[in-house]
Amino acid sequence: MTQDLFEWLTQAEYDLMTAKDMFNAGRYIYTVYMCHLAIEKALKALVNASTGKIPPKIHNLIRLMQLASAELTKEQKEFLATINTAAITTRYPEELKSALAKFNKVIAKDYLVKSEDVIKCIALDPKLKR
């Protein structure tokens, strides 16, 4: 595994741990934000492995999934679309009160579990030879 791939995956794992910490602290908006960031970095590792190029500086998980030729389940792809949209709201909330209501404990836990699943799947991709 090249240094770039290792670094992307290390940061993805770190961000996922941060998402868990944010969840445990009751900071659910940031749980969702960090889940998105962790998936983004894992996908960027896969883009790098698949293309041999530096991944683009974008946040769109769907586009990164396509560039990476990620082999995800239908449910995982649907989740990427969901969290992709949520990331805009968590990055740029128009009103904190509504964002807090939208991303409550139940939603944040669901996103955290699904994010772990997606990242695990990406990390096991044969293109990421460890």
Image: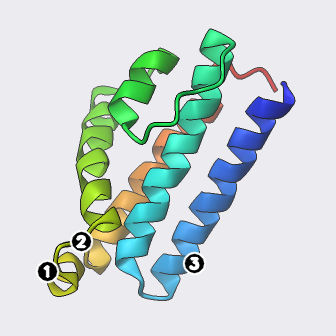
Task: Quickly name the residue at label 3.
Answer: 21
Please, what is the three-letter code of the amino acid marked with disc 2? Pro
For disc 1, the neighbor class at 10 Å (few under 14, some 14 to 19, many from 20) is: few
> Vertically, is 79 above or below 54?
below
Which residue appears at 77% of the width and 20% of the height?
A: 129
Q: Which mark is residue 98?
A: 1
Q: How far is disc 3 from disc 2 in space, using C-alphas? A: 21 Å
Task: Quickly name the residue at label 2.
Answer: 93
How many numbered circles are shown? 3
Of the two numbered discs 2 and 1 in the rendering, the one whose residue sits closer to the viewer:
2
Q: Nearer the viewer, residue 20 or 87?
A: 87
Q: Nearer the viewer, residue 62 or 126?
A: 62
For disc 3, the neighbor class at 10 Å (few under 14, some 14 to 19, many from 20) is: some
Of the two numbered discs 3 and 2 in the rendering, the one whose residue sits closer to the viewer:
2
For disc 2, the neighbor class at 10 Å (few under 14, some 14 to 19, many from 20) is: some
In terms of sequence position, does the residue under pointer 2 or pointer 1 come before the other?
2
